[in-house]
Amino acid sequence: MLTRRAFLSLALLSWSVTGLGFEVLHDYSGSTFFNGWDYYGLWDNLTLGNVTYLSAEAATQQRLTYVNDAGNAIIRVDNFTTVSEGDRRNSIRITSSEFYEYGSLWIIDALHLPYGCSVWPAFWSKGSHWPNDGEIDIIEAINLMPNNQMALHTTEGCVHNTTAPQTGFNIDNDCGTASGCTVGMSSPNSYESGFAAAGGGVYATQFDVSGIYMWFWSRPNVPDSITSATANSSMNISSWGPPTASYPTNAYCNITNFFSAQQLIFDITLCGDWAGVPGTYDGTGCANAGPNNNCYLDNVVGNGSNYDEAYFEVAYVRTYTTGVVLPASTATSTSVASSSSGSQTSTPSRSQKSDAWREHGSLEAFLAASAVAMLAGCLFTLA
Ligand SMILES: *[C@@H]1O[C@H](CO)[C@@H](O)[C@H](O)[C@H]1NC(C)=O
Ligand SMILES: *[C@@H]1O[C@H](CO)[C@@H](O)[C@H](O)[C@H]1NC(C)=O
Ligand SMILES: *[C@@H]1O[C@H](CO)[C@@H](O)[C@H](O)[C@H]1NC(C)=O
Ligand SMILES: *[C@@H]1O[C@H](CO)[C@@H](O)[C@H](O)[C@H]1NC(C)=O
Ligand SMILES: *[C@@H]1O[C@H](CO)[C@@H](O)[C@H](O)[C@H]1NC(C)=O
Ligand SMILES: *[C@@H]1O[C@H](CO)[C@@H](O)[C@H](O)[C@H]1NC(C)=O
Ligand SMILES: *[C@@H]1O[C@H](CO)[C@@H](O)[C@H](O)[C@H]1NC(C)=O
Ligand SMILES: *[C@@H]1O[C@H](CO)[C@@H](O)[C@H](O)[C@H]1NC(C)=O
């Protein structure tokens, strides 16, 4: 039966094919991968992990970020320094200097993701003020978890209780809580040793006024539209199938009220207020990692030989846009949620920004940006 949703989608579909491909904005790859990122250069005062995030100069010099012989970017934890009790281990946190607006699409092709006891990596995005401008967790897991989790973090008032098609399963529905609205993945090889053993895979995120959609494909299942893409070809997402996690704008969460333009971030912390929490640490495969059942003492302290797998190997990150540029700031400040698993601590709330939408946005732009996502949604509704 043709549902109302499908009908609406079809109406938009006929209209959306008038040139709504995604055009490349930035290709981070090869020898220029690390151009366009800012290094944190400070200890992890955000998630209270036992690491110091190096500056660009130190990271290059110590080879915690570099491009390997295969032309892939390596982002890793120091596995060669002996750390004494009371000290931190060196690691990396880099943030794209570019902010990505609504209507954008981010694709990461990776061969290896960091894992191991105490290891807490993430590839994610956030707006300029956390949590008011939103956070999108694309790749995030800890310790020896076999699977990745996706999530949104927002201020209070965004609930993910949609029935929109997604292949993942909802774990937490309230995006305004400390844990965020998490979607678990049952697809094999999304993280840990399985990810690398399958040859890695691709994660894609569509950041749109119509919603936020994330996909994962293990290497054998990466769609042709992605495997055949070059650094500058446009992207057509219509054959991608249902997202792994779907967060459509609806009555329970209007995405534009909770998100502004996003910066992309890679980081790897150790222990800290998710991976290192007693109960969580030993509950994610690390109870027997050392004599102390303690994240810091049994992992961070010592010669670092347990961090040989604590690295990202990334073929590229490509960002795209529909070309429909919407206002950078459309998020609305409400209360500031408390942070614990969030990757930042809270910042003061800002003034209402929804008026900016009315001033600079247009219904046409809203519909145009919606159409691509709806197109994808439509195919599953009909299937
Ligand atoms: C995307 O691909 C679909 C199916 O192959 C096609 O119908 C559609 O016209 C394409 N869209 C664009 C913008 O090229
Ligand atoms: C390591 O992390 C633990 C738990 O967050 C914290 O109590 C301790 O002070 C940290 N130590 C160092 C040296 O960072
Ligand atoms: C979705 O969440 C809202 C707000 O918490 C609630 O009122 C509504 O009943 C929920 N709907 C479903 C289908 O769970
Ligand atoms: C696209 O990029 C390739 C290299 O990846 C280059 O050879 C080609 O000239 C580029 N095409 C355009 C239209 O920029
Ligand atoms: C979401 O908010 C925007 C801006 O306030 C508004 O234009 C749009 O109609 C809202 N969408 C829904 C589905 O409520
Ligand atoms: C590093 O420390 C571990 C555990 O303490 C030990 O098993 C390993 O042999 C050490 N490696 C080197 C190269 O010293
Ligand atoms: C660190 O790990 C890499 C693999 O990620 C490995 O090639 C290298 O030998 C390790 N270094 C030391 C000192 O163990
Ligand atoms: C982290 O430290 C920097 C430099 O001191 C400071 O500007 C920033 O506010 C701190 N962040 C948090 C969340 O404490």
Image (spheres, rainbow, N blue to C red):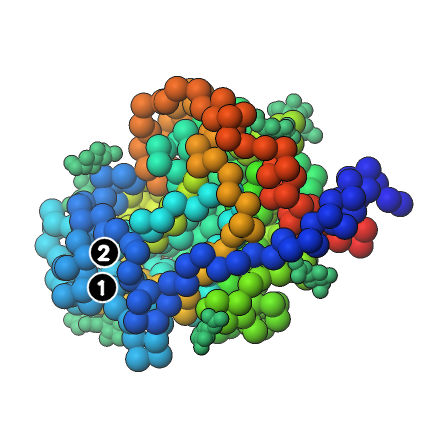
Determine which of the numbered discs, if any, sits on residue 91 in the image.
2
Q: Position of residue 91 (x, y in %)?
A: 23, 56
Q: Is residue 200 above or below residue 130?
A: below
Q: In terms of depth relative to the viewer, which is nearer, 31 or 59?
A: 31
Q: Tell me if 362 is positioned left or right of 67 in this view.
A: right
Residue corresponding to mark 1: 64
Q: Position of residue 280 (x, y in %)?
A: 39, 44
Q: Earlier in the sequence, mark 2 or mark 1?
A: 1
Q: Tell me if 289 is positioned left or right of 217 in this view.
A: left
Amino acid at dot 1: Leu
Q: Quadrant of residue 188?
A: bottom right
Who's the residue at 17% across and 46% down the image?
42
Who's the residue at 12% across and 62% down the image?
82
Who's the residue at 75% across and 53% down the image?
379
Residue with the most extreme bottom position: 69
Task: Find out whether the residues at labels 2 and 1 contact each other: C-beta distance under 8 Å.
Answer: yes
Q: CA distance from mark 2 to mark 1?
A: 7 Å
Amino acid at dot 2: Ser
Ligand 2 location (quadrant): top left
Q: Residues within 10 Å of mark 1 (few under 14, many from 20)?
A: many
Count of numbered badges drawn on the protein = 2
Q: Is residue 95 above or below residue 241?
A: above
Determine which of the numbered discs, if any, sits on residue 308 in the image.
none
Q: Tell me if 247 is positioned left or right of 311 in this view.
A: right
* Residue 361 seen anywhere in this rendered image of the structure: yes
Q: Residues within 10 Å of mark 2 (few under 14, many from 20)?
A: many
Q: Is residue 159 above or below residue 85?
A: above
Q: Secondary structure at mark 2?
A: strand
